[in-house]
Image (cartoon, rainbow, N blue to C red):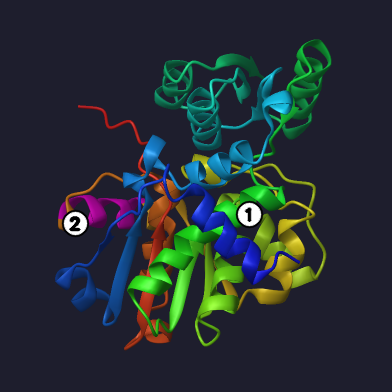
Amino acid sequence: MISKKELIDTHNRIKHVIHATPILTSTTLNELTECELFFKCENFQKVGAFKFRGASNAVLQLSPKELENGVVTHSSGNHAQALALAAKMAQAKCFVVMPSNSPKVKIDAVKGYGAKVTLCPSTQKDREEFTRNIISKTGAIFIHPYNDERIIAGQSTCAKELIETIPDLDIIIAPVGGGGLLSGTILSAQYFSPKTLVYAAEPQGADDAYRSLISGKRILSHTPNSIADGLLTTLGDKTWPIIKNGIEKIIVVSDQEIKHALQLILERMKIIVEPSSATVLAAVMKNKKEFSGKKIGLIISGGNYQIKI
């Protein structure tokens, strides 16, 4: 288990490179949901997503010798961008394997940070095989997108900042894909605000975490299909135990509910978020009675969304 001291040390380690992102509110959305909502806006984080927290923590813990051959990962976009920037700041090479169906805006951004991108078929097996090939050729160090204690500790700092700024939250809701952000959120709540419950929001078309929780066993067979492209991965063996033992509930939302929440955030809050981020508001909208009168922190995970004009 990652200790409370490790979370504090992590925050101190990365404070100088991350943004302490703003927490926004909306009177209209509070009235609409009949509760107090506090949006932790990681769409304003470097690279436009919370992923920079974990990536920077991982890279900052590597020695100059370890960084000589660079770092490598597989990612659909946000972790790819985060690791590319973290490596660039450390003056190290970065190799990224991305599914060929990744949004063009994310592929272009990864290349823009100086990483070498290799496209692969959009299966977990292909991601891992392509990554292994790069490691064998380059000797680069693998940084997993979420199933890594350094990554989990880094992501925990998002909820830690939220808790420190808005005390006495009844609930924090985070999106769940691979579980790095959610497991980090659970740890921060347990250590820094024990009375705060942690919920997760998950797309209906990629509900492996929900099915894992119901069955009590981590689901590995997974064919996801959702507008929330950042939440299509399966839980890892490091994130799953934390989630299994610490989550209050996982709420599944449809793509239509995500789109509605996305539109509300854009129209009422005037900020751009990606579909993965909108799942948390969609979860509240779907369960108004359950959340009525509560003080709720919502983690807006990122804003890398290509709006067509």
In the shown orientation, is residue 119 left or right of residue 102? right
Rendering coords of residue 255 (x, y %): 44, 51
Q: Is residue 202 visible?
A: no
Q: Give residue 74's quadrant in the image.
A: top right
Rendering coords of residue 279 (x, y %): 43, 58
Q: CA distance from mark 2 to mark 1?
A: 29 Å
Magenta residues, as a range?
A: 259-267
Of labels 2 and 1, earlier in sequence is 1
Question: Regarding mark 2 in the picture, which secondary structure is present there?
Answer: helix
The relative height of residue 69 versus residue 206 in the rendered view (above or below) is above
The relative height of residue 55 versus residue 139 in the rendered view (above or below) is below
In the shown orientation, is residue 170 left or right of residue 124? left
SS majority, magenta? helix
Q: Give residue 303's quadrant in the image.
A: top left
Q: Which residue is mark 1?
A: 152
Comparing 229 with 2, the one in front is 2
Task: Report the amino acid beneath label 1.
Answer: Ile
Comparing 305 with 227, the one in front is 305
In the shown orientation, is residue 273 left or right of residue 72? left
Q: Which residue is mark 2?
A: 269
Q: Residue at x 32, y 89 (%)?
A: 293
Question: Regarding mark 1 in the picture, which secondary structure is present there?
Answer: helix
The mark total stands at 2
Please tell me whether residue 262 belongs to the stretch shown in magenta: yes
Comparing 151 with 103, the one in front is 151
Circle 2 Cα neighbour tier, 10 Å, few/some/many (<14 / 14–19 / ≥20): some
Q: Residue at x 84, y 16 (%)?
A: 136
Task: Report the amino acid beneath label 2.
Answer: Met
Q: Is residue 15 visible?
A: yes
The relative height of residue 138 versus residue 260 in the rendered view (above or below) is above
Quarter of the picture holding the C terminus: top left
